[in-house]
């Protein structure tokens, strides 16, 4: 198996059919790549399609257009066939540690689910203990049930389970959103440490921009089903090129000597069932101008890409250069 | 555990909620220690003992007729005798042997059939689910007893067909409860996580879905045991159940109902039905209180 | 002027299968008219329980000592009637999960007006008018239409604003907000914070804001309380509290945050976990996790003592602390 365990999305679209709202295109054309050894952060408001993309990445839902490939092969939706071989190299850590562990099975039994069949006999138990040690939990945790652990500990156990089949790529869908600041730091450190040590790739989804800033090599900003900007994290933070990225950064509350309210982004997150025409951010964008009635193309600027008419040299008004 | 989204399943479980109030509601005592639960367990234990030891305990052969008809309760005949001079106490005791196992059989069969169908409907979803749910709606559309009468009348009135009829009228409720439990967990991430680790769908169904959905069905089954005793009695009351002269409580009540001045003929089997039904209900209620987080707060 | 809310030496003990568990110890705090006060600390430190105490929502069997005076009335020991009065027009509450506060099957309008008709004895018309006014006040677009909508038709942020509108219906003077933005995005959170600040400025509403995000604490509130294991360990004006902490726990909480200064840095979590109720060590509850602990820390829980302008800290060592970022 020589193909690198890269995860790539090409023009992925995912639609939900729902009563009343008709067809909802929750992901509307996303191209993104995550390589082994790389942490890609994905940020965006609630409902913009982050989880939908994550689920499509591992095959929990099927894209209606475009392709998701892992290690050079298309990811197939879960069906009647058990996942095997290279497929289990792609794992997911879920947002809610209270729902992602079965309350009625011991931790050990749930970890064993992922231990490869090639490992047999007493080596299986040894592997479970090894996994628990890796996430800094006592080996006695194997005999206990999920409710005996706090949220942060559960998330560590869920991470141990995801590590069981020795994955090469991890999708982490808001793994720390349900935790308080200190447990967040513990879990994030653990995840990042593991990804670096084991040379895995990780797609880290969060709406906490500050957190993503801290850990991601590359950050992709999603708005209403599309990626509006992707760039090396440092550059994205230093010089955001998309007005929405700017708004997200400004909305992070900062610690300072006097209270200072974070900037407000006008308007509501639109319903993806009737997304605005043209640039989807237009109704809320402080810089919107004439060309924005058309959907902006994603412009490749070397190591970063932006989908905004402001970055297009042909249309950009000179005043709007600095956001 | 799971909460149920299906109103019909919900109703099936909530039907006898008043019994909870009878027990005094929110006392902090564990349900197994509450006096009414202890009483119910004792009653059921007593009936089981009577059923097991019927041959030893019953003073007379339950089928033996005697010239001493319509004897009122006395030292010789504790519960009196019926129109054919049969000892009612002996018949009631032997009746436990018939009613309780039959009720158990009805409920287990219905649980098995309904549970399996519900599991499949909930997990597979789509048209399988749609078809099964319409079928349950069809059954729900008739009052249970009417449907059961129709089925037994069609197949011929005897014990086997009565049991069959009662299974037919009662499986849908288990199907709905289990399906709704499965549905509410189908999106649960622990299932997804297991599947991503390489666990196949059948194993996931058995190890992750079934144990988490069986709880409400067990509670319901206990509650339904009382109902089964009652329905069976009703069928035999109408002459559609176990054939005479078998000592079945319902048919014994029917016999007495012909002339109410001989109250003992119907009252004693009636009381037997009442105590068993109540005891099962109290027990089911206690089980629900233990298993259902909505009735017991905390971890 | 006496503070609007004055909590003094509050202690709460909850029943548990293993006997009574002391959860809050010696909590004192004040909120002035029109003041934004923050309460922060890790999960399980007793923030919500403090709020529940102030609204008379403690579970049965809870034992409470100390005092909590609201506008001169002692709250502890009120009967059901007294609480009804306090909750109606005095203290209102907003929770983390707005869906829990809203009935899914009733329209927003029904829930808003029902509240007013019961608590304020308003007639249908007046209640309807006020409902529109309230929704407008919390910046729900097209309030008339919103009144006829069901909660699920709103986004999370809008739902939280509706919950705030309901809390404001009876014109409370103190709003206790228990992590109202924890489940929301930064952009939506910014809107809620601005809304609370505007309500304070326009109507003189006092807000006790519970959070575990120190950034939110700093951005919104003027005075803060840091809770640890059911105690107040440090308090003071938020600005100085968070830029120059004097308690090792406050500093450690600050250190665990993402700093936003450089990429690739690792976070510095606080080692270990807070003690479970009833399992706190005899001395300073933070001792097992504290990098500055000395033998004297193990003797008794340090009392909150004045330290600098308007500030108090519960630490016997008072080490020199590096200021994080
Ligand atoms: N099963 C579903 N059926 C119909 N619509 C759905 C379904 N799941 C999600 N959606 C819709 O798709 C859109 C994207 O949802 P998604 O959960 O991917 O957002 P998200 O970015 O993960 O948000 P959050 O931060 O709240 O988790 C939303 O508008 C949501 O309402
Ligand atoms: N009804 C209860 N019975 C027993 N213990 C309880 C009860 N409610 C809360 N506790 C305990 O009291 C402590 C304080 O809980 P509280 O909910 O106030 O924490 P919190 O600071 O609000 O945490 P979070 O940030 O998670 O909301 C916790 O240890 C909790 O386990
Ligand atoms: S394309 Fe126009 S509307 Fe869209 S983000 Fe850029 S400036 Fe704003
Ligand atoms: S009293 Fe001691 S243990 Fe407690 S915070 Fe201060 S230095 Fe640390
Ligand atoms: Mg999501
Ligand atoms: Mg809380």
Image: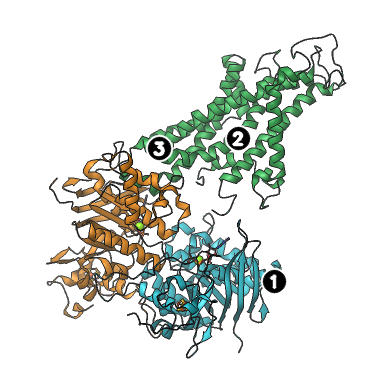
Q: Is residue C225 visible?
A: no
Shown in orange, the chain is A
Q: Is residue C216 above or below residue A112?
A: below
Badge 1 sits on which subunit? C
Instruction: Residue at 49% x, 63% y: name it.
Output: C98
Left or right: where C288 falls relative to A76: right
Residue highlighted by disc 3: B205
Residue B289 lies, in percent from the top left, at: 61, 46
**Which quadrant of the picture is home to ligand 5?**
bottom left
**Drawn colour of chain C?**
cyan
Labels 3 and 2 in the same subunit: yes
Left or right: where A34 falls relative to B86: left
Q: Is residue C59 visible?
A: yes
Badge 3 sits on which subunit? B
Left or right: where B101 falls relative to A249: right
Q: Secondary structure at mark 1?
A: loop
* Label at residue C77: 1
Shown in green, the chain is B
Instruction: Residue at 50% x, 31% y: name it.
Output: B114
Residue C251 lies, in percent from the top left, at: 40, 78
Residue C74 falls in which quadrant of the image? bottom right
């Amino acid at each position: 198996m020589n193909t690198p365990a890269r995860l790539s999305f090409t023009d992925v679209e995912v639609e939900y059919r729902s009563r009343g709202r008709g067809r909802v295109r929750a992901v509307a054309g996303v191209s993104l790549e995550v390589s082994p050894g790389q942490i890609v952060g994905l940020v965006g408001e609630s409902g913009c399609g982050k989880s939908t993309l994550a689920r499509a990445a591992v095959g929990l839902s099927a894209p209606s257009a475009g392709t998701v490939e892992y290690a050079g092969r298309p990811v197939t939706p879960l069906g009647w066939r058990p996942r095997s071989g290279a497929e289990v190299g792609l794992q997911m850590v879920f947002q809610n540690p209270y729902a992602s562990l079965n309350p009625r099975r011991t931790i050990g039994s749930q970890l064993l689910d992922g231990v490869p069949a090639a490992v047999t006999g007493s080596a299986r138990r040894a592997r479970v203990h090894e996994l628990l040690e890796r996430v800094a939990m006592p080996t006695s945790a194997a005999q206990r049930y999920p409710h005996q652990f706090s949220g942060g500990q559960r998330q560590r156990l869920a991470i141990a389970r995801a590590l069981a089949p020795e994955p090469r790529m991890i999708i982490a869908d808001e793994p720390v959103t349900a935790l308080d600041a200190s447990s967040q730091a513990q879990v994030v450190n653990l995840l990042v440490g593991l990804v670096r040590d084991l040379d895995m790739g990780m797609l880290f989804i969060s709406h906490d921009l500050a957190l993503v800033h801290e850990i991601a090599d590359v950050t992709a900003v999603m708005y209403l089903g599309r990626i509006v900007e992707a760039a090396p994290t440092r550059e994205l933070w230093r010089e955001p090129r998309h007005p929405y990225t700017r708004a997200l950064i400004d909305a992070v509350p900062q610690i300072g000597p006097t209270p200072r309210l974070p900037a407000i982004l006008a308007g509501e997150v639109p319903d993806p069932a009737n997304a605005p025409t043209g640039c989807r951010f237009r109704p809320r964008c402080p810089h919107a101008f004439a060309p924005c009635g058309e959907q902006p193309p994603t412009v490749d600027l070397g190591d970063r890409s932006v989908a905004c008419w402001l970055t297009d040299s042909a249309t950009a008004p000179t005043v709007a250069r600095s956001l | 555990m799971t909460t149920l989204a299906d109103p019909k399943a919900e109703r099936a479980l909530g039907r006898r909620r008043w019994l909870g109030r009878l027990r005094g509601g929110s006392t902090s005592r564990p349900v197994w220690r509450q006096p009414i639960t202890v009483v119910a367990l004792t009653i059921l234990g007593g009936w089981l003992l009577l059923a097991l030891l019927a041959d030893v305990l019953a003073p007379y052969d339950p089928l033996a007729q005697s010239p001493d008809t319509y004897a009122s309760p006395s030292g010789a005949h504790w519960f009196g005798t019926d129109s054919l001079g049969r000892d009612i106490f002996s018949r009631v005791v032997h009746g436990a042997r018939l009613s309780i196992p039959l009720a158990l059989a009805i409920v287990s069969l219905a649980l098995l059939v309904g549970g399996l169908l519900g599991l499949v409907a909930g997990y597979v979803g789509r048209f399988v689910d749609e078809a099964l749910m319409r079928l349950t709606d069809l059954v729900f559309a008739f009052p249970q007893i009417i449907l059961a009468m129709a089925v037994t009348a069609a197949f011929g009135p005897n014990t086997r067909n009565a049991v069959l009829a009662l299974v037919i009228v009662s499986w849908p409720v288990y199907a709905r409860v289990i399906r709704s439990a499965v549905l509410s967990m189908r999106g649960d991430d622990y299932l997804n996580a297991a599947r991503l680790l390489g666990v196949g769908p059948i194993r996931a169904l058995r190890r992750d879905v079934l144990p988490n959905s069986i709880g409400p069905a067990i509670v319901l089954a206990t509650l339904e045991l009382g109902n089964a005793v009652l329905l069976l009695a009703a069928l035999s009351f109408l002459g559609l159940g176990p054939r005479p002269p078998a000592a079945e409580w319902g048919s014994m009540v029917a016999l007495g109902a012909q002339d109410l001045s001989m109250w003992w003929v119907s009252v004693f089997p009636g009381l037997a039905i009442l105590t068993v039904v109540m005891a099962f209900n109290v027990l089911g209620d206690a089980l629900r209180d233990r298993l259902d987080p909505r009735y017991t707060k905390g971890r | 002027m006496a503070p609007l809310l004055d909590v003094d030496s509050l202690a709460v003990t909850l029943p548990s299968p293993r006997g009574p568990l002391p959860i809050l110890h010696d909590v004192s705090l004040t909120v002035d008219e029109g003041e934004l006060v923050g309460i922060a600390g890790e999960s399980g430190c007793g923030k919500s329980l403090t709020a529940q105490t102030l609204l008379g929502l403690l579970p049965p069997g809870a034992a409470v000592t100390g005092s909590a005076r609201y506008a001169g009335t002692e709250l502890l020991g009120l009967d059901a009637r007294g609480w009804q009065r306090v909750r109606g027009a005095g203290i209102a509450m907003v929770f983390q999960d707005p869906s829990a506060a809203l009935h899914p099957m009733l329209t927003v309008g029904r829930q808003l007006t029902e509240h007013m008709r019961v608590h304020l004895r308003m007639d249908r018309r007046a209640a309807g008018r006020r409902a529109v006014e309230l929704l407008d006040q919390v910046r729900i677009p097209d309030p008339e239409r919103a009144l006829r909508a069901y909660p699920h038709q709103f986004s999370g942020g809008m739902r939280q604003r509706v919950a705030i509108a309901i809390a404001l219906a009876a014109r409370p003077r103190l709003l206790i907000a228990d992590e109202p933005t924890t489940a929301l995005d930064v952009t939506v959170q910014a809107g809620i914070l601005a809304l609370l600040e505007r309500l304070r400025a326009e109507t003189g509403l006092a807000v006790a804001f519970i959070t575990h995000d120190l950034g939110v604490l700093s951005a919104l509130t003027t005075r803060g309380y840091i809770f640890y294991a059911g105690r107040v360990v440090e308090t003071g004006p938020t600005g100085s509290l968070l830029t120059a902490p004097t308690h090792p726990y406050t500093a450690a909480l600050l250190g665990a945050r993402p700093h936003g200064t450089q990429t690739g840095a690792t976070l510095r979590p606080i080692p270990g976990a807070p003690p479970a109720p009833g399992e706190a060590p005899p001395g300073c509850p933070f001792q097992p996790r504290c990098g500055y602990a000395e033998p004297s820390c193990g003797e008794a829980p340090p009392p909150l003592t004045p330290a600098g302008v308007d500030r108090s800290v519960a630490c016997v060592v008072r080490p020199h602390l590096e200021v994080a970022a």
